[in-house]
Image: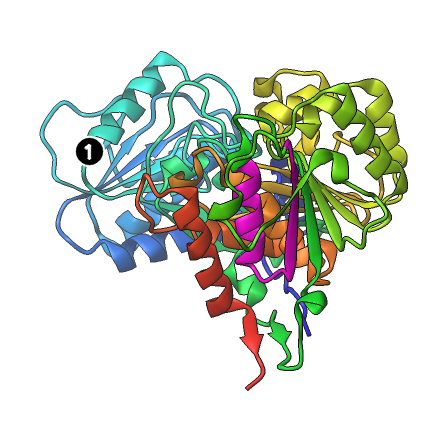
């Protein structure tokens, strides 16, 4: 029995946040007032040592948040405040806030003060959610100085220089200890350069934002699985746990199949059969629980619960025919990985994929996705959310665009999921093969396709957290098994 995955955390784009802000503005709600109150409460509660609050304020509404917060700290708490504002106001809200604060302090600078000052915390209120360009030299220099300080640093809404929608840094970004998020969590926190520019997120939903717009973008975190369990009965045999076929394996990439097969076995599948160039395969006695067959022995009519095709696959005409046959005739779930993306780069093969009746899971990393989209890897990374939705129109497909903040797009429901787990440990050969095997294992055990993908991507990432750099994928597979048994697998006692 498996219960429901809960999606209580959602992710927002900059355009969605702006729509929410406009609706509130039309109602007469002062969001700057609300945000500045939260900023003040946080700063006063957390930084009570001696020294100055140093606000770096930009020319827009993010800067207005900072200016109002600084004003309230001066007038309500009589704290020492320094304001650095290198550019003239560009919004009415910013100009009004600046006018107000000039009445209570003269400590407003164009650049970082040269005299020695004691700082308790630096507050980054330079750029907000709308910023997505190269930072000019004047502000770049201020950010460079701030990043050198060891004192606490707080960013308002997003670290300045990080794109809200992509997480990409153009030339420099503010490095904060804490990022105070307002209205909703943004995509950029979790992708590309974003996670390297803060240590902790604190979210203030000022307006119950998730109810204001129809959302189809969800964050995948541990809370999603609090009520999700996979229960195993006592009266069970290997047939009940399914059979996963893994087709691929060219010299010298046999290790890819072995990692996929071991990952599947250690996630509970009943049986794994790998299809390889058997004449050159010299590992069969090392892994006795993996059934090994030659590529020529593959039979689409065998009773496979699911098929994983691609790890170590050689993109030749023989394998293309097998791949196309699976796409045309297999009616269950197939996981498409690695070498298959070279085959799918051919238009005719891709069209067969588009029309396939199988439940399809595609697992490209950005370079593989670029082959399918006929664009560069940089173009994929510059707008991952856009491009994952363009990979295929097959309504039975789920796409995983791997990388920091892996994205999952379900073509059936048009829902997008953003994974929040993972670490640098995964940046090594074989991590994708392990993930593919894990997905195949859970699907073969009759976990629904989408649930199997979400569980696999999240716990694949979670199992890497806190592990040592240099952890081999053979070691890592055991970490996944332990994490699954601790969190979602239960046996009836």
- Return the residue nearer the eye: 71 or 313: 313
The residue labelled by disc 1 is 149
Q: Which residues are magenta?
A: 256-277
Q: Position of residue 294 (x, y in %)?
A: 68, 37
Instruction: Determine whether 476 is above or below 247 in the image.
Output: below
Point 21% across, 29% down: residue = 148
Q: Is residue 418 visible?
A: no
The crowd level at tag 1 (other Cα within 10 Å; few <14, some 14-19, many 20+) is few
Q: Is residue 333 visible?
A: yes
Point 33% across, 15% down: residue = 138
The quadrant of the picture occupied by the N terminus is bottom right
Colour treatment of the image? rainbow
Instruction: Determine whether 307 is above or below 351 in the image.
Output: below
Q: Position of residue 6 (x, y in %)?
A: 63, 64
The quadrant of the picture occupied by the C terminus is bottom right
Left or right of 70, for residue 265: right
Point 55% across, 30% down: residue = 130
- Return the residue nearer the eye: 329 or 125: 329
**Is 266 a magenta residue?**
yes
Helix, strand or loop for disc 1: loop
Q: Quadrant of residue 237?
A: bottom right
Q: Position of residue 301 (x, y in %)?
A: 86, 48
Q: Residue furthest top?
A: 137
Point 85% across, 43% down: residue = 395
């Amino acid at each position: 029995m498996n219960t429901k995955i809960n999606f209580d955390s959602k992710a927002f784009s900059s355009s969605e946040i702006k729509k929410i802000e406009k609706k509130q503005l039309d109602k007469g709600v002062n969001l700057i007032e609300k945000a500045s109150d939260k900023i003040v409460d946080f700063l006063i509660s957390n930084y009570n040592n001696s020294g100055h609050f140093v606000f770096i304020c930009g020319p827009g509404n993010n800067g207005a948040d900072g200016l109002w917060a600084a004003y309230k700290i001066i007038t309500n708490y009589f704290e020492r405040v320094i304001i650095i504002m290198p550019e003239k106001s560009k919004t009415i809200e910013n100009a009004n806030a600046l006018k107000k604060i000039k009445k209570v302090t003269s400590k407003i600078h164009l650049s970082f003060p040269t005299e020695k000052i004691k700082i308790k915390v630096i507050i980054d209120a330079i750029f907000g959610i709308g910023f997505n360009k190269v930072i000019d030299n004047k502000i770049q220099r201020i950010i460079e100085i701030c990043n050198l300080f060891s004192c606490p640093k707080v960013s308002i809404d997003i670290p300045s220089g990080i794109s809200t929608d992509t997480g990409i840094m153009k030339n420099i970004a503010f490095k904060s200890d804490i990022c105070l998020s307002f209205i909703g969590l943004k995509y950029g926190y979790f992708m590309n350069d974003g996670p390297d520019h803060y240590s902790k997120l604190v979210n203030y939903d000022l307006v119950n934002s998730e109810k204001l717009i129809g959302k189809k973008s969800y964050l995948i975190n541990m809370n999603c699985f609090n009520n999700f369990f996979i229960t195993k009965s006592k009266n069970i045999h290997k047939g009940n746990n399914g059979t996963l076929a893994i087709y691929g394996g060219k010299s010298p990439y046999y290790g890819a199949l072995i990692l996929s097969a071991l990952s599947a076995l250690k996630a509970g599948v009943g049986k794994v059969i790998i299809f390889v160039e058997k004449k050159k395969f010299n590992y069969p006695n090392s892994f006795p629980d993996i059934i090994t067959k030659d590529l020529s022995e593959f039979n689409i009519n065998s009773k496979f619960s699911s098929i994983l095709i691609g790890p170590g696959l050689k993109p030749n005409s023989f394998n293309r025919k097998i791949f196309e046959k699976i796409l045309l005739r297999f009616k269950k779930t197939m996981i498409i990985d690695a070498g298959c993306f070279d085959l799918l780069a051919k238009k005719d093969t891709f069209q067969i994929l588009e029309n396939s009746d199988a439940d399809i899971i595609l697992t490209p990393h950005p370079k593989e996705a670029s082959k399918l989209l006929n664009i560069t890897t940089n173009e994929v990374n510059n707008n991952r959310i856009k491009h994952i939705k363009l990979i295929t129109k097959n309504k039975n497909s789920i796409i995983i665009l791997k990388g920091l903040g892996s994205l999952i797009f379900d073509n059936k429901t048009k829902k997008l999921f953003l994974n929040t787990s993972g670490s640098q440990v995964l940046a090594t050969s074989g991590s994708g093969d392990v993930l593919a095997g894990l997905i195949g294992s859970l699907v073969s055990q009759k976990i629904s396709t989408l649930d199997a993908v979400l569980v696999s991507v999240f716990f694949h990432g979670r199992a890497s957290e806190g592990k040592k750099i240099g952890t081999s994928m053979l070691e890592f597979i055991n970490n996944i098994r332990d994490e699954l048994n601790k969190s979602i697998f239960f046996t009836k006692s």
